[in-house]
Image: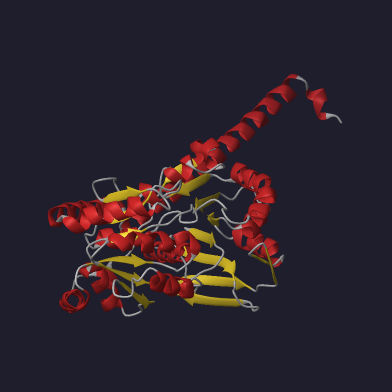
Amino acid sequence: MRILHVAKYYYPYAGGMESIVKDLCEGLVQKGHEITVLCSHDKWSYEETVINGVKVIRLPRLWVLFGQNINLRAFSKLRSLAKAADIVHLHTPNPLFETASLFIPKSIPVVCTYHSDIVRQRLLLKFYKPLFNRVLSRLNSVYVPTENHIKYSEFLIHRKDKCKIVPFGIHTHHLISSDETIQEAMRLRSEYGSYCIFIGRLVGYKGIPTLLKAMQGVDQKLVIVGDGPDRLKTIQMIKELNLETKVILLGKVFDKIKFSALIHGSEFLVLPSVTPNENFGIVQLEAMACAKPVITTRLKSGVPAVGIENKTTFLSEPGNHEDLNAKMLTLFASSEMKREMGRAARVHFEENYTHQSMIEKQDHFYKHILTQELKNQDGRNDNDNDRENQDEKRLKRNPLEQVV
């Protein structure tokens, strides 16, 4: 199949959506599909490249409005590329390309993976609602990673009939428990002692202040892996709460062995996000792949639906540091509970979130859509033939109808 994926950005641009789109596209290439990605550039230049078998076309960023890259060439470029594709696959939210998708010929199937609602740009949302409702009417199918994406979306809750569940999946080659990884994990445990881990950007919605307040009643350590605009605020808060001996702020960790060892050496992962800007939390999959329990929050998003409450995951109330503290103390106190939840987490990952599983499900739905399109086309052809036969019979009965 020739499949056109349409995203806001693409690798090497770093982000949760970009990571999923990259893994999905490369997996589909390995299945034998011809994959093209159309996206925006974070620079002012046009670019065409091939990355691991995926053709990537980046349109230059001409100006920015409500945090969205604007380039009117998106309309003509998407339409021309769509005409050469069997299926067009949008990744939303992406208002520019969603608008452009309305001009794709009706004969071409269009689907989307719905990563999240628009949460921050409330003014944009006012204009976006009628637009995206039109896009939804045009789409053949909508793919979501969890049931919660439907339940808590003001758009999808009324379009359940179009929604299909395709859980996100990840590669685990960077998380393999090799001899080097085990040795590094042992070294980290020797250096830090018992610790839990946070992995992610240092931004407001991640809930770092809640996590630091929760650490005030904990004897063990917290290792923070990540960087972001709130780094200085985080350092300041660590000092204000007298947590300098408890919190290790590592920044980004690029070394794959050390990254894997940090997870393997930890007791559990904490993802204390406080708003639905956190719509899934890929890092939960990385922890579960390493047989680690997760503590996250009861958000109205896909986050709490990734694991199984009280089996692989503890859920705390968003922004409630006392509740988070209680969950952390419970896990730190029971080695047997950590082992049981860790084993369950690994099984849950293998059954639901492998990269191969994501590719197989997506491939299945593509084939289903094309099969339906062929049936619809055959039905239209049959109707045309019926009309022609009826015309012939009518003309035989009344040859004068041939005279105009």
Q: Residue at the right extreme?
A: 404
Residue 104 point in image, percent of width and height: 65, 53
State the residue in front, 290 or 315. Answer: 315
State the residue in front, 122 or 137. Answer: 122
Q: Using residue 397 as the reference point, say whether residue 93 is left or right of it.
A: left
Residue 266 point in image, percent of width and height: 23, 67
For the point 29% across and 50% down, which residue is it? 314
For the point 62% across and 29% down, which residue is it? 386
Visible in this render: residue 371? no
For the point 53% across and 77% down, which residue is it? 49
132 to 356, vertically: above or below: above
Q: Using residue 34 as the reference point, say whether residue 242 is left or right of it.
A: left
Image quadrant for the C terminus? top right
Residue 64 point in image, percent of width and height: 68, 68
130 to 60, vertically: above or below: above
220 to 92, vertically: above or below: below
The color scheme shown is secondary structure
For the point 49% across and 75% down, which residue is it? 50
Q: Residue at the top extreme?
A: 397
State the residue in front, 158 or 356. Answer: 158
